[in-house]
Amino acid sequence: MKETKPSAPVALRAAVPADATAIGMVFDAAVSVAWTYLGDLAAEPMFMPHEWDQLVADHTPPNVLLVAVDAAHGVVAYTAVHPWDGEMFLLFVHPAHAGRGIGRTLLAAAHNALRAAGCQEAFLFTHEQNTRALAVYAAAGYRPDGSIRSSDFRGTTIRELRLVKSL
């Protein structure tokens, strides 16, 4: 039986520009643990601070960028969705907060945002080597639709599977 960490209270809210650095830190921490198949690339920041600022700026309504904050108001996880096409764009939880249901809470909030925008289906892309993410999304009802795309991470090509879910 898998041991679950005790729940720590988190609150969800819309991201604000001041969250950009913390969002980048969550991403870097999560990638360093989950994307080990990228070798040394996973251990170094993949994006510059101005790129995190741009991510927040790009996710004002109608796009959605939600952060999960702990009792000290620190960002511990985030998700982004694009209601105009139904894309679950990002979902990352800091490894120190993994296993507490925060990702599932964010995923549910993302699905609610897509439903509220009239989406009947959600889709996302995830690395085919990211077994943890694939398991999380499968448990949430996502299924591969057979589409694959390639992304470049600093010269390393990564295959990404497209997963879909009816909302």
Image (spheres, helix red, strand yellow):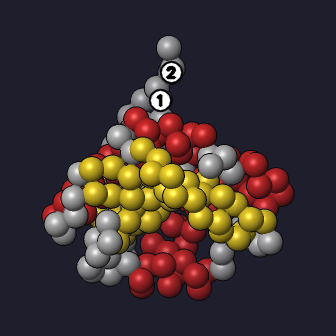
Residues at circles 2 and 1 in contact by the CB criterion of under 8 Å: yes
For label 2, count other residues whose C-alpha is less than 10 Å away and answer few (under 14), some (14-19) or many (20+): few
Q: Report the number of discs.
A: 2
Label 2: which residue?
Answer: 3
Question: Taking 30 as reference, is 79 left or right?
Answer: left
The percent coordinates of residue 8 (x first, y second) are: 38, 39
- Per the model, the C-alpha gap separating discs 2 and 1 is 7 Å
Query: Could you tell me which secondary element the residue under label 1 belongs to?
Result: loop
- Secondary structure of residue under mark 2: loop
Where is residue 126 drawn, in percent x and y? 55, 55
Relative placement, left or right, of 47 versus 6 is right
The answer to whether residue 87 of the structure is visible from this angle is yes
Q: Amino acid at mark 2?
A: Glu
Q: Amino acid at mark 1?
A: Lys
Residue 67 in sight from this viewpoint = no
Q: Residue at x 52, y 67 (%)?
A: 22
Q: Quadrant of residue 95?
A: top right
**Neighbourhood count class around disc 1 (C-alpha, 10 Å): few under 14, some 14–19, many 20 upward:** few
Farthest right residue? 40
Give 152 or 22, whichever is nearer the viewer: 152
- Residue at which label 1 appears: 5
Identity of the residue drawn at 78% across and 65% down: 156
* Image vertical order of residue 11 relative to residue 133, above or below: below
